[in-house]
Amino acid sequence: MSDTAPGGAFAAFIAGLPKAELHVHHVGSASPRIVAELAARHPDSAVPHDPAALVDYFSFRDFAHFIQVYLSVVDLIRDAEDVRLLTFEVARDMARQNIRYAELTVTPYSSTRRGIPGEAFMEAIEDARKSAEAELGVTLRWCFDIPGEAGLAAAEETVRLALDLQPDGLVSFGLGGPEIGVPRPQFKPYFDRARAAGLHSVPHAGETTGPQTVWDAVRELGAERIGHGTSSAQDPRLLAYLAEHRIPLEVCPTSNVATRAVASLEEHPIREMAAAGVLVTVNSDDPPMFGTDLNTEYGVAARLLGLDAAGVAALAKNAVEASFMDAAGKARLAAEIDACTAARA
């Protein structure tokens, strides 16, 4: 078995490496076991109750079909108990991968519009966050994102929830959902309010649309990181700008193929991004839905970029640098990565 083979020493190194994850969705991280449990609790849902059947259910024709399936899972989160269960179990799955810190993208509007009071939602995620840190050693922080397909009413409600009920774990403000037909500039007033309150700007952009969406996210929304940014590679001037201004890209290779945003892993533009000097971070997005996890994504990135153990460790440190951890937290996790790498040498 070669060092880079699945299950080999290289894969074991990746699995043991302390990691941070910056682009991973709350509901999209629900494992088949948890989705099936929630579906059984809410039998009126079309979501299968059998974890094995979820493999076929999570096969996506295109991005629009992915959104349709994703929202059907969102509909399973109907009370604060569901929210707390989901959040803690996501952290448990992260702990198994040696993820020490994660900025979880949460869409509170999807829950409050289904009748969960905002206060109860915040209490549930915060209770799970504190328990995850105490019991699992996983530090969670929140990015509250606007579901773009729900329009400006959702933007208004999301910024209200973020600013009026601002939970201790909240660090950033985002924008997700479909990009086609959902121009970024219309959300500028909401990002302005969030940024004025001290939240970081991390919108999705350039996943299923062209580089102009990324430019809009930077110029209009003050993006400090870009979710996906896949099409940035089509514009050398944009790549140069992102590199010069150290605006990281949250790259999710398997997700991009699963949603048909990219035709194949071999055609993924991560090589062009890295070659241009962009701060590239690797992430899993909606891991169970795409049949992946962060360890797998590191393996994919290592293959595409030709990385050895030191290169993978540097990739892990990119995520630490691009995170919104405080300086002490960054130094601590970077030192853990260095120690893990040195132990392998």
Image (cartoon, rainbow, N blue to C red):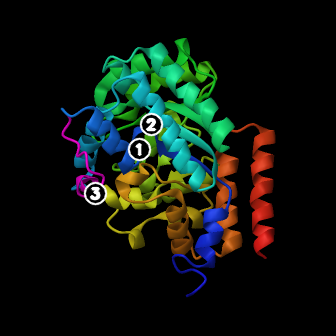
Q: CA distance from mark 3 to mark 1?
A: 14 Å
| Residue at x 50% of width, y 62% of height | 297
Q: Earlier in the sequence, mark 3 or mark 1?
A: 1
Q: Is residue 199 above or below residue 327?
A: above
Q: Quadrant of residue 102?
A: top right
Q: Earlier in the sequence, mark 2 or mark 3?
A: 3
Do the residues bearing badges 2 and 1 touch, measured as CB atoms within 8 Å?
yes
In magenta stretch: residue 60: no
Residue 39: tell me if it is visible: yes
Do the residues bearing badges 3 and 1 touch, measured as CB atoms within 8 Å?
no
Which residue type does callout 2 highlight? Leu
- From the top left corner, tell me how far across and down residue 53 is, in percent: 24, 55
Question: What span is colored magenta in the figure?
Answer: 45-59
Secondary structure beneath disc 3?
A: loop
Secondary structure beneath disc 1?
A: loop
Which residue in the structure is indicated by mark 2?
Answer: 86
Q: Is residue 142 left or right of residue 335?
A: left
Which residue type does callout 1 highlight? Ala
- From the top left corner, tell me how far across and down residue 184 is, in percent: 40, 34
Which residue in the structure is indicated by mark 3?
Answer: 52
Q: CA distance from mark 2 to mark 3?
A: 19 Å
Secondary structure beneath disc 2?
A: helix
Which residue in the structure is indicated by mark 1?
Answer: 30
Q: Earlier in the sequence, mark 2 or mark 1?
A: 1
- From the top left corner, tell me how far across and down residue 197 is, in percent: 61, 18
Q: CA distance from mark 2 to mark 1?
A: 6 Å
Q: Is residue 55 left or right of residue 82?
A: left
